[in-house]
Amino acid sequence: MLDCLERDTGPEPLYSVIWLHGLGADAGDFWPIVPELGLPASPAWRFVFPNAPVRPVTINGGMPMRAWFDFFSRDSISPMDTDGIAASCRALEELIEREEQRGIARNRIMLAGFSQGGAIALRTALLSDRPVAGIVALSTFLPPLEPLEPSASAKGLPCLAAHGRYDEVLPLRLGLDSRARLEAAGCQVEWREYEMGHQVCGPELADISVFMQKVSGAMTGTG
């Protein structure tokens, strides 16, 4: 199982969010944003930040680094490292199951990710037989699902998809294409664009906070 850092917003968390970092980063990358989200102490959230495995990455000259899958080209996301993507999705599914074993119901577990991490979060959620609470997909894309198809659990799945208008790593068009595919699968997509590149900004964090509280409120019947 992947090693993780964890951070709770209060005692006895009622919800979990498993948050995957981007290429070359690590579990500590998004650790500092937890207090910036301004989530209430009750009901509490557990943030789970897993480390991706270390593997050679082709676009970086084969240099070993933390990556959810290999990237073969800087100019295109195709061809895809389908084996690496599938393996990371299985690893994420194991973390979801562990949260269930710790007493967090699956429909109270949110998936989040930036760049590569978002791709794994999206694919895992769309192919899962049972729905998670929602998805936060930041500056990312939905990898090909073929030969599989989106699960019925994707219908109505809340998804906050956000992208920078000036992203040169994963251009905005990839995010827009993923948005269309998510909507075609039946997801309830909230789309956001920001005046930024391949990064995270303050207004985006504010939107994430609102989304998380809205989804958790719907789960408890208070929103």
Image (cartoon, rainbow, N blue to C red):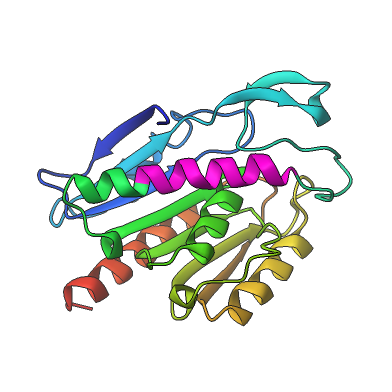
- Picture quadrant where residue 75 is located: top right
On the picture, is 173 further left or further right than 123? Answer: right
The one nearer the camera, 177 or 166, is 177
* Residue at 76% across, 45% down: 169
Residue 7 visible from this viewpoint: yes
What secondary structure characterizes most of the magenta part?
Answer: helix
Q: Which residue is the extreme one toward the front?
A: 147
Q: Position of residue 198 (x, y in %)?
A: 68, 46
**Residue 209 on image: x %, y %:** 36, 59
Segment colored magenta: 81-95
Residue 185 falls left or right of residue 171: left
| Residue nearest the viewer, comparing 56 with 13 | 56
Q: Is residue 38 visible?
A: no
Q: Would you say residue 90 sits in the magenta stretch?
A: yes
Q: Is residue 84 magenta?
A: yes
Name the residue rendered at 42%, 48% in the picture.
Answer: 93
**Which residue shows up at 84% across the image and 51% down it?**
78
- Image location of residue 158, percent across then percent down: 43, 72
Quarter of the figure that contains the N terminus: top left
- Residue 23 relative to residue 165: left or right: left
Q: Residue furthest top?
A: 63
